[in-house]
Amino acid sequence: MGVKHTIVRLGLETLYFSGAHMLLRPLVGGVGAILMLHHVRPSRRDRFQPNRQLEVAPEFLSRVIRKLRRDDIDLVSLDEMHRRLTEREFGRRFACITFDDGYRDNRQWAYPILKQADVPFCIYMATGFADRLGKLWWLALEQVIARNARVALVMNGRETHFDCADVDAKVAAFEKLYWWLRAQPSEQALLSTMDDLAARYGVDMAAFCGEQCMDWREIGDLARDPLVTIGAHTVNHPMLAKASEGEVRTELKMSRAVIAAALGKAPDHFAYPYGDPTTAGAREFRIAAELGFKTAVTTRPGVLFAEHAGHLTALPRLSLNGGYQDTRYIPVLMSGAATALWNGFKRVDAA
Ligand SMILES: [Zn+2]
């Protein structure tokens, strides 16, 4: 992830400072974009924050909204995005704001800002998180490494040790362990390793859900506001592409049924957990469409083109994250120039 971040950041800065995005715009400019956020909360000072790419500060969200409005971009709901794509109404550029997972800080910090500015948004919730059954293993991993100077676990059948004595060592250990876990053949394999690690170092993995995620009452309050769309994000937040077809169908169907039962309205929109090509691909895009979701979003980077009307369950997003909290990047991202370079100028990536 470190290298990828550096490339993205260098790419963005090069594009911004060269003004190249304005030159590329006729070539790459899409009809709109879906913005992806996770946590919105005041920045912490800790030097070891390996999950910082999952958060932005409230002031940054405010600035992004003001910037998009100044640039005359419509801020619309996912239903309105779906309508514009399917009716081919591209007179004005648009953006949708989306949050993944259902964190409590969305309600505490983002909602007042969005409400005041009258901006519609979607929260894609994993129902297991609201039910307090979810395992936010990436936070448990952060805590294991933050609290210990040395971490040991069984990797590929061998006891392996990581030096975690200072911040640089902790960052390196997190990077290595995070991607090794993500490369596990199944969610069960990932979670059983994390269960062992959490138990070994006295970290209560179950507690993160209650601390960080909204419960049903909190989600229900938000869902009553017409600005808010509640989307599905599975029950257990698994790496879907590594599960069987039956498991994928169950995760999608159950999450929709549980939300419908709890909130009185079935969700029409879906977000694939993790959402990169290793966790969501052609099979998942087909299943989401077959189950009747109007749209489904990935975390593949990109803006929306007219052609996406034919790939409504394989939509790309632009990540707003902790590494790039600078509104100078927004026009570059919205122009599609950065992601066009990233995608080799391919407009639709639905394979
Ligand atoms: Zn998620």
Image (cartoon, rainbow, N blue to C red):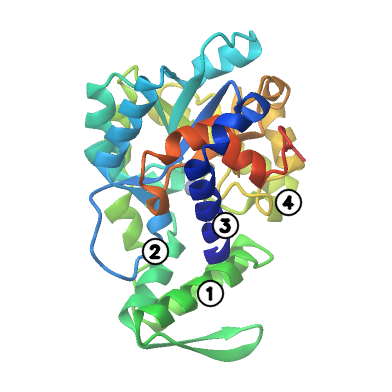
Q: Where is residue 51 shown, x and y percent of the image? A: 41, 60
Q: Is mark 4 within 8 Å of ligand 1?
A: no
Amino acid at circle 3: Ile
Amino acid at circle 2: Leu
Quadrant, the N terminus: bottom right
Residue 7 - label: 3
Question: Relative to 285, is 57 on the left or the right?
Answer: left
Residue at 53%, 18% (x, y): give it: 81
Marked residue nearer the N-terminal end (2 or 3): 3
Q: How far apart are the two marked residues, 4 and 2, measured between alpha carbons?
A: 26 Å
Tag nearer the camera, 4 or 3: 3
Q: Where is residue 182 shown, x and y percent of the image? A: 59, 64
Q: How far apart are the two marked residues, 2 and 3, measured between alpha carbons?
A: 25 Å
In-front residue for pair 98/304: 304
Marked residue nearer the N-terminal end (1 or 2): 2
Residue 177 - label: 1
